[in-house]
Image (cartoon, rainbow, N blue to C red):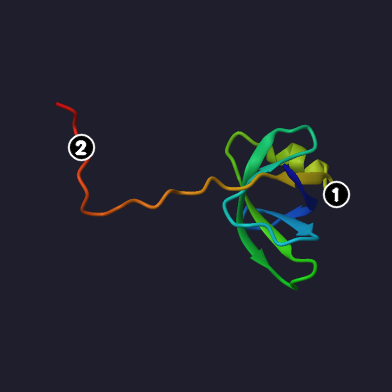
């Protein structure tokens, strides 16, 4: 896990807005300082040096708790890479 940035506020859309020092890749899982999963990176916008990150919160994440802890440190893990599939190939079965 890498340091993502600090949480700022929850937008009217229900997404958590954070400020980061680096540009995270969309789809990364976001954790709070207690290592609880809170959401996924959905959108990165703003200046390239200190971008804003929009985080889609999981249903299990407590919005009230997150709202009270504005300024909390957030961490992100890399999104799982999808393996490219070969099209038109059927799996071989052993006889």
Name above or below for residue 42 compared with residue 72. Answer: below
Q: Residue at x 30, y 52 (%)?
A: 86
| Residue 7: % across, % down | 79, 51
> Is 36 rendered above or below residue 57?
above
In the picture, measured across the screen, residue 79 lies left or right of residue 87, that is: right
Q: Quadrant of residue 62?
A: top right
Q: Residue furthest left?
A: 95
Other residues around mark 2 within 10 Å, as few (<14) / some (14–19) / many (≥20): few
Residue shown at the point (62%, 57%) measured from the top left: 25
Residue ID for mark 2 = 92
Residue on which disc 1 sits = 71
Around disc 1, counting alpha carbons within 10 Å, would you say few (fewer than 14), some (14 to 19), or many (20 or more)? some
Q: Residue at x 79, y 70 (%)?
A: 49
Residue 58 position, x and y percent, is 59, 41
Looking at the rendering, in which quadrant would you find the C terminus?
A: top left
Helix, strand or loop for disc 2: loop
Identify the residue at the far bottom of this view. 47
Using the rendered view, name the quadrant where residue 53 is placed: bottom right
Residue under the image location 70 percent in, 33 percent down: 36
């Amino acid at each position: 896990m890498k340091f993502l940035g600090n949480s700022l506020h929850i937008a009217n859309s229900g997404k958590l807005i954070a400020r980061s020092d680096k540009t995270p890749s969309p789809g990364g899982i976001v954790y709070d300082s207690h290592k609880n999963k809170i959401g996924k990176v959905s959108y990165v916008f703003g200046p390239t040096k200190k971008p804003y990150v929009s985080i889609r919160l999981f249903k299990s994440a407590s919005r009230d708790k997150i709202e009270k802890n504005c300024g909390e440190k957030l961490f992100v893990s890399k999104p799982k890479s999808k393996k490219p599939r070969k099209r038109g190939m059927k799996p071989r079965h052993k006889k």
